[in-house]
Image (tube, rainbow, N blue to C red):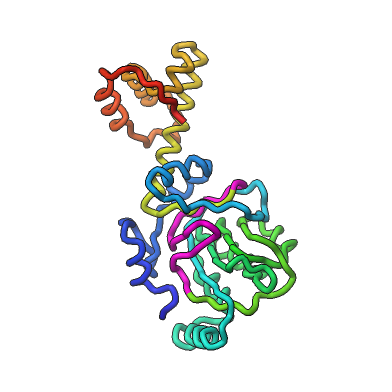
Amino acid sequence: MKFDNREDIIQITPLWEGERFPNGRPKVPTDILRRMKKVTLEEAWGPLWGKGYRYQFQGDFKMIHPKKKMVGRAVTAVMVPMRPDLHDYLLKYGQQQEGRRGFFNAWVVDSLQEDDILVVDLFDKIYQGTYVGGNLSTAVAARTKRGGSVIWGGIRDVEQVMEITSIQTFYRGSDPTGIGDVTMVGMNVPCRIGNATCMPGDVVLGTPAGVLFIPPHLAETCVVRAEKSHVRDVFGFIRLDEKKYTTAQIDGRWTLAIWEDFVDWFNTSSPEEYRHLNWDKELETARATESEKPSTEVRL
């Protein structure tokens, strides 16, 4: 077996059609990551749930910086309890055949790129399950700039890690012991974090509510849907304040007349940050349903 294998990564991410890193990991555009920072966890979760991605969220974490949102691209690692024959072989293989240095956790940290998030299944181990401490967290910050870590296990040197303000760390608990009695069996492979599945290249959205792993081919969909909801809210607040429409009209399915009013407003008065959005599909749907009876559904 090989660690961080390009062919394997490409094979398990077939729906991604965009740019990739040299190791095959999907590279969601930086612009999408920037825009994702304005999206709430629930807004990003909705499209995933609707498309059948039911196991992308995990809560029950501790956070180093309670109010800091985290967005980046996943680099995954899977650890298991140490079995001597497997452990010795894989450690020797990585060091001698792949030229890696140090222990397994250092291999993954040394591979990080800007905007990456370290995602580690450490099988909820905390005692001798401290994947990062002050030194490796400093390295994570230096390499990712504004990324961070999601550790389904422990960390150490919490006071030192708290001083690193450029990154965020989600973890299950802390302990003064160093990492031990664990073996890495996969790097940039499918990774279980609690009840969620993370893949290499997933967009990781971390908030005080928990962590969401967004498949790379759906990241733009999540962002655009949230942005459209935001700008429709802006329009709705304005028209409600003007008393042009009722609350029921704004909260319900919009008529063609409201859509046309919205698009006119959007083209002339909407905030600049939303001007890239396109509304052709919404207008087409509104025209197609104009003759139907009024809907009682409420826009969420």
- Residue 288 to residue 176: above or below: above
Is residue 247 visible in the rendered image? The answer is: yes
Can residue 70 be seen here? The reply is no
Q: Residue at x 37, y 35 (%)?
A: 277
* Rendered image quadrant of residue 136: bottom right
Q: Nearer the viewer, residue 98 or 275?
A: 98
Where, by quadrant of the figure, is residue 227 drawn? Answer: top left
Relative side of 161 to 96, left or right: right
Based on the picture, tell me whether residue 42 belongs to the magenta stretch.
no
> Looking at the image, which residue is at 51% across and 85% down?
86
Q: 283 or 191: nearer the eye?
A: 191
Extreme residue toward the top, this view: 243
Residue that appears at 52% across and 15% down: 241
User: Quick one: 85 or 110, which is closer to the camera?
Assistant: 85
Q: What is the x, y in percent for residue 213? A: 48, 54
Label count reads 0
In magenta segment, residue 191 = yes
For the residue pair 15 and 181, the one nearer the viewer reads as: 181
What residue is rendered at 63% in x and 55% in y?
Answer: 61
Residue 214 lies, with reference to residue 299, above or below; the image says: below
Q: In the picture shown, does residue 271 fall above or below 66?
A: above
Image coordinates for residue 128, horizontal then vertical, percent: 68, 74
The magenta stretch is 186-209
Q: Quadrant of the N terminus?
A: bottom left
Residue 175 drawn at (x, y percent): 72, 68
Q: Give residue 149's position: percent from left, percent from top.
A: 58, 61
